Image (tube, rainbow, N blue to C red):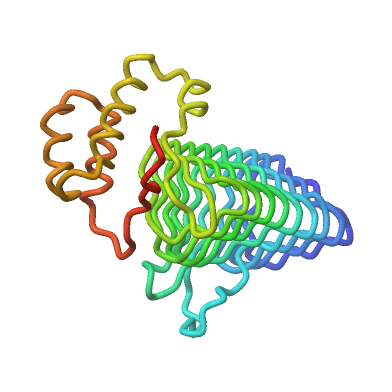
Amino acid sequence: MAIIHPTAIIEDGANLGEGVQIGPFCTVGAEVNLGDGVMLDSHVVIAGRTTIGPNSRVYPFAAIGTSPQDTKYAGEASDLVLGANNIIREHVTMHPGTAGGGMITKVGNNCLFMVGAHVAHDCQIGDHVILVNNVILGGHVEVQDHAILGGMSAVHQFVRIGRHAMIGGKSAVESDVIPYGSVLGNRAYLSGLNIIGLKRRGFARDEIHGLRAAYRLLFAQEGTMQERLVDVAAMFADHEQVMEIVAFIQADSSRALCQPKLDCAA
């Protein structure tokens, strides 16, 4: 049974799971689905066709599922789907999809969105992702599992950020970031691998050494990127993490690849 504060407004049709708690002055729209154990603290707006997975918590003044900030959006029915165990802090905003991006914005499980973070229309966010305070994601951004985006960083629309990548605070990211990469700056450049993150998440020494060797080859100055990519794929065919980077670079993308400065090493 849900616990609902008397000042909250729950529109007819909203689906509330077992143990949902809705605090003072919250508003929940008619097409919203809240999973078991979801908690809305106070002054939270959940609108549109929004689904929030079990055991997630939304803090005051967050606005989740309101209309996209896209001038082409014409009111079409689109979705915002969040997985389980997500934490959404104060003043976070998240928007549903649009016709130009598959009509859905998706967030995985066990993510943390700190104060003032923004997730634009059609973004695809994996599991265990952290957006630190005031991070801004443009439309259609893909953020893969375990990526961390530092405070006040901004990501251009359609950019892809690979698994276990680290975005330094106040970075402006306009190019794709390889898995396990670390970027910083305005405009952001690839500063090496996210070595600290890899160690914290238990990657083996041999895996890290292989990544560092492949990184140096991929971003060397000899030959073209395509030639180096072929060489690395042949040399590290049995290295799972290196081949993940190779596949990421080879995948179709509308954005360029974030590259290191000439003097940066892993």
Which part of the image, by quadrant, shows the N terminus? Answer: top right
- Point 33% across, 20% down: residue: 209
Residue 203 falls in image quadrant: top left
The quadrant of the picture occupied by the C terminus is: top left
Q: Position of residue 265 (x, y in %)?
A: 39, 35
102 displayed left or right of 40: left
The relative height of residue 197 versus residue 55 in the rendered view (above or below) is above
Q: Quadrant of residue 252?
A: bottom left
Q: How many marks?
A: 0
3, 24: nearer the viewer: 24
Q: Nearer the viewer, residue 95 or 199?
A: 199
Residue furthest to the top = 205
- x 25%, y 27%: residue: 240
Q: Position of residue 161 (x, y in %)?
A: 42, 49
Residue 104: image location, x then y, percent: 44, 63
Asked whether, in this view, residue 135 is left or right of residue 22, the answer is left
Q: What residue lies at 30% left-to-right and 34% top-to-bottom?
A: 215
In percent of the image, x 68 and y 67: which residue is there?
Answer: 12
Query: Residue most toward the front?
Result: 263
Q: Position of residue 138 (x, y in %)?
A: 51, 65
